Image (cartoon, rainbow, N blue to C red):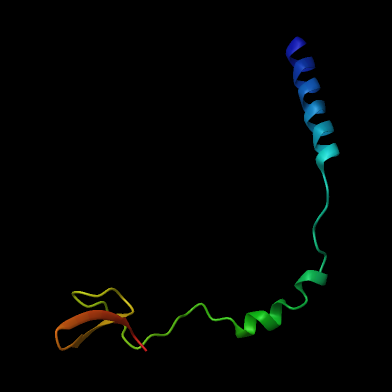
Amino acid sequence: MRKFAITLAAAAAVLLAGAFTYSADATLGSGTLGLPMAAKDYSPVDRVSCRTAGPLCPLGYTRVCRPFKCWCARCK
């Protein structure tokens, strides 16, 4: 019986503390009205001209050499 009383008191304390700290900040539709328009213009794919990584440069970069100097430049 003592365990039940302690469990009941702890549950009541948690519920009471939750009631004091609860605030509803949810938007009920007005914040999501522009979502379909934004989803049309968004693409998660970043297109690059060089699609493979070279032996010296990472993916999205290509090796460019000029006289006396070489470096990795972004693909266009």
Q: Residue furthest top?
A: 2
Query: Residue sitting at 18 percent across and 82 percent down?
Result: 69
- Of the pair 32 and 62, the residue shown nearer to us: 62
- Of the pair 1 and 28, the residue shown nearer to us: 28
Q: Is residue 19 above or below residue 37?
A: above
Quarter of the image for the N terminus: give it. Answer: top right
x then y, percent, for residue 5: 79, 15
**Residue 68 left/right relative to 57:** left
- Rendered image quadrant of residue 67: bottom left
- Of the pair 32 and 3, the residue shown nearer to us: 32
x then y, percent, for residue 66: 19, 88
x then y, percent, for residue 20: 85, 37
Query: Residue sitting at 23 percent across and 79 percent down?
Result: 71
x then y, percent, for residue 15: 81, 33
- Rendered image quadrant of residue 9: top right
Q: Is residue 35 above or below residue 11?
A: below
Q: How many marks?
A: 0
- Rendered image quadrant of residue 54: bottom left
Query: Residue sitting at 54 percent across and 81 percent down?
Result: 43
Quarter of the image for the C terminus: give it. Answer: bottom left
Q: Residue furthest front?
A: 68
Query: Residue sitting at 73 percent across and 14 percent down?
Result: 3
